[in-house]
Amino acid sequence: MPLKHTIYKYLLATKEIGIFPLMKFIFFNWNNLKLRNFNNEKVYIRKNKNEDLDVFNSIFAGQYHIPIIKINSDCTILDLGSNIGLSALHYKILFPKAKIFCYELDRENYIQAKKNLKNYNDVIVENKAIWYKNGLISYQKSGMKSDAYHIGDDTHASIQVESLTIDEIIKKNNIQQIDFLKMDIEGAEIEIFENDSSLDWLVIVNAINIEVHEKCYIPMIVKKLRYMGFLAWEDGRHWSAISGIRNN
């Protein structure tokens, strides 16, 4: 990792947790951090995972995942691709009465997310992948970053996990309305928007944020969101993301 990026990452983290806790994290393997700007909420990040600190900064400094419209405190949120649970934790700070459904395909991240969200009975965390059909999918870590994955139907890949469609999640949890849906699912968003013949689940979504892992697919996803009744656009807060709000 370039030194310039490392320094910048630690400077961002300092803003949220203070210099002394950060030094304990770097030099003494101290991974119980308090968010001084967010009610001193505790978070747990793994010392040997540089990507955890990147996620920490993205959530609490970048805040790319925040709804762009006002939603009520007692909202329903789908956090698809919840990583180590920090986005859901931030939603609980912002919307204390929210009911949140979290899905993370990677087992190690899922275990960490459960740890970060253990104090919230109204946050459901499942170790499942989001896909365009129910069943099993396989994934491999990319080799460049331990939090980046290649996902597909190939059952011969190294790691397998149960997959669910968004329709199945809605049915399973008897969800009547989704106030906000955040999607960061490592490229599976492309398969969903290309292969889901109906996209009927979008009818009950009021606002959406999608991280698109191949930027060239942004126009296709924006077009389909607009067809389904959304005002949708490429979100300049992030290098490759879409935001949308229901227009009817």
Image (tube, grey):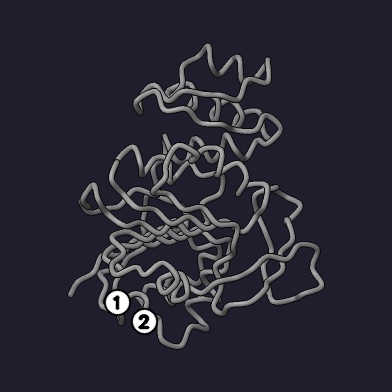
Rendered-image quadrant of the C terminus = bottom left
Residue placed furthest toward the front? 121
> Which residue corresponds to mark 2?
200
**Contact, mark 2 vs mark 1 (Cβ under 8 Å):** yes
- In the displayed image of the protein, which residue is found farthest to the top? 20
Instruction: Specify the quadrant of the image occupied by residue 151.
Output: bottom right
Residue drawn 67% across the image and 36% down it: 49
> In the image, what residue occupies the spot 52% across and 84% down?
195
Q: Where is residue 92 in the image (x, y as percent from the top left)?
A: 35, 42
Depth check: give the residue in front, 102 or 18: 102
Q: What residue lies at 43% left-to-right and 51% top-to-bottom?
A: 238
Measured Cα–Cα span from mark 2 to mark 1: 6 Å
Question: Alpha-carbon neighbours of circle 2 within 10 Å: few (<14), some, or many (≥20)?
Answer: few
Q: Which residue corresponds to mark 1?
A: 203
Q: The residue tagged with tag 1: helix, strand or loop?
A: helix
Q: Which of 169 and 187 is in front in this view?
A: 169
The amino acid on which the numbered mark 2 sits, given as a three-letter code, is Asp
Q: Is residue 105 left or right of residue 172?
A: right
